[in-house]
Image (cartoon, helix red, strand yellow):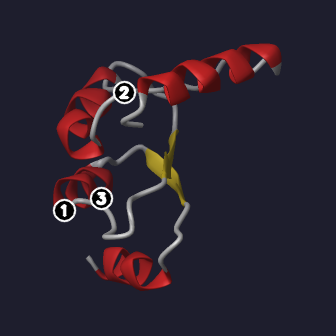
Amino acid sequence: EIVAQAVDDAKRNAKLNGIENVEYHVGKAEETIKEVIQSLKGSNREIVAVVDPPRAGLHTTVVRALRNCERLKHLVYVSCNAKSMVEDIKK
């Protein structure tokens, strides 16, 4: 998420709802994805990623990183633009 206040709100909502198995990151996905995946390497947990890309779709860097993440078991793709979603799936 690029809006820090949105991340703060999400953390607060997770705490209120007793959700502890989630991480939030501030920044553009294409700039943070490699670090996020790297930080999970010591864990043996399966990964579920939730992406909500802009209308243009996911950045190519993000698509590659997600495809190369062997422990990624589920991807939740929230889209307001079905055409860009189809293009991301084709990548």
Residue 17, percent across and down? 82, 21
Under mark 3, the amino acid is Arg
Q: Counting other residues with Cα less than 10 Å from the Cα at mark 2, is it few (<14), some (14-19), or many (20 or more)?
A: some
Specify the label residue 67 is tagged with.
3
> Which mark is nearer the camera, 1 or 2?
2
> Which mark is nearer the camera, 3 or 1?
1
Compared with 89, 60 (above or below) is above
Residue lying at 43% horizontally and 24% vertically, measured from the top left = 4
The answer to which of 10 and 22 lies nearer the viewer is 10
Tell me the SS state at disc 2: loop
Disc 1 vs disc 2: Cβ atoms closer than 8 Å?
Answer: no
* The quarter of the displayed image where residue 34 is located: top left
Determine the CA span between mark 3 and mark 1.
11 Å
Question: Going from the N terminus, do you reach mark 1 or mark 2 first?
Answer: 2
Determine the CA span between mark 3 and mark 2.
21 Å
Instruction: Give the labeled residue for mark 1.
Output: 60
Specify the label residue 26 is tagged with.
2
Residue 21, percent across and down? 63, 23
Question: Going from the N terminus, do you reach mark 3 or mark 2 first?
Answer: 2
Residue 49, percent across and down? 49, 46
Under mark 1, the amino acid is Thr
Residue lying at 36% horizontally and 25% vertically, measured from the top left = 40
The answer to which of 56 and 24 lies nearer the viewer is 56
Disc 3 vs disc 1: Cβ atoms closer than 8 Å?
Answer: no
Compared with 83, 14 (above or below) is above
Residue 89, percent across and down? 38, 77
Tell me the SS state at disc 1: helix
Q: From the viewer's perspective, is 14 left or right of 28?
A: right
